[in-house]
Image (cartoon, rainbow, N blue to C red):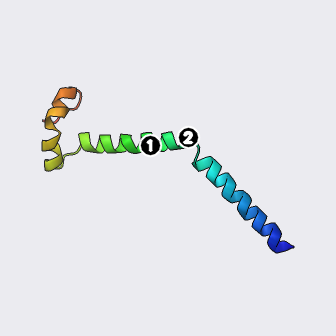
């Protein structure tokens, strides 16, 4: 009897976890945060190859000084 009760609790937790983390608002938030981190890292990078590749874009945006 205890095993069946524990199994139901685990299954219930699994369903709650799936419904919470697979929901559209959570997915959109995660994608927006990851995209923001990638864009911020690329545009404000001082690493020479990345800076050279995005140099014209940085000047074109006119709000990211680079030199």
Q: Looking at the rendering, in which quadrant would you find the C terminus?
A: top left
> Which quadrant of the structure image shows residue 40?
top left
Q: Residue at x 40, y 45 (%)?
A: 34
Measuring from the top left, give residue 58's x and y in whole percent: 19, 33
The answer to whether residue 57 is left or right of residue 14 is left
Q: Secondary structure at mark 1?
A: helix
The answer to whether residue 6 is left or right of residue 34 is right
Residue carrying label 2:
24
Measuring from the top left, give residue 62's x and y in whole percent: 20, 26
Measuring from the top left, give residue 23's x and y in whole percent: 59, 43
Classify mark 1: residues with Cα within 10 Å, few (<14), some (14-19) or many (20+). few
Q: Residue at x 62, y 53 (%)?
A: 18
- Tell me whether circle 1 and circle 2 mark residues in contact (CB < 8 Å): no
Classify mark 2: residues with Cα within 10 Å, few (<14), some (14-19) or many (20+). few
Point out the tag, 1 or 2, that comes first from the N-terminus: 2
Q: Secondary structure at mark 2?
A: helix
> Which quadrant of the structure image shows residue 9?
bottom right
Q: Nearer the viewer, residue 47 or 6?
A: 6
**Residue at the farthest right position:** 1
Rendered view: 66 above or below 12: above
Q: Looking at the rendering, in which quadrant would you find the N terminus?
A: bottom right
Q: Residue at x 18, y 27 (%)?
A: 60
Residue carrying label 1:
31
Instruction: Report, in whole angstroms, how far the alpha carbon at label 1 lies from the one at label 2.
Output: 11 Å
> Which quadrant of the structure image shows residue 32?
top left
């Amino acid at each position: 009897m205890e095993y069946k009760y524990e199994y139901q609790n685990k299954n219930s937790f699994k369903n709650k976890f799936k419904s919470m983390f697979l929901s559209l608002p959570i997915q959109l938030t995660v994608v927006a945060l990851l995209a923001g981190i990638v864009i911020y890292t690329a545009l404000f990078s001082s690493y020479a190859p990345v800076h050279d590749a995005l140099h014209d874009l940085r000047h074109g945006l006119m709000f990211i000084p680079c030199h």
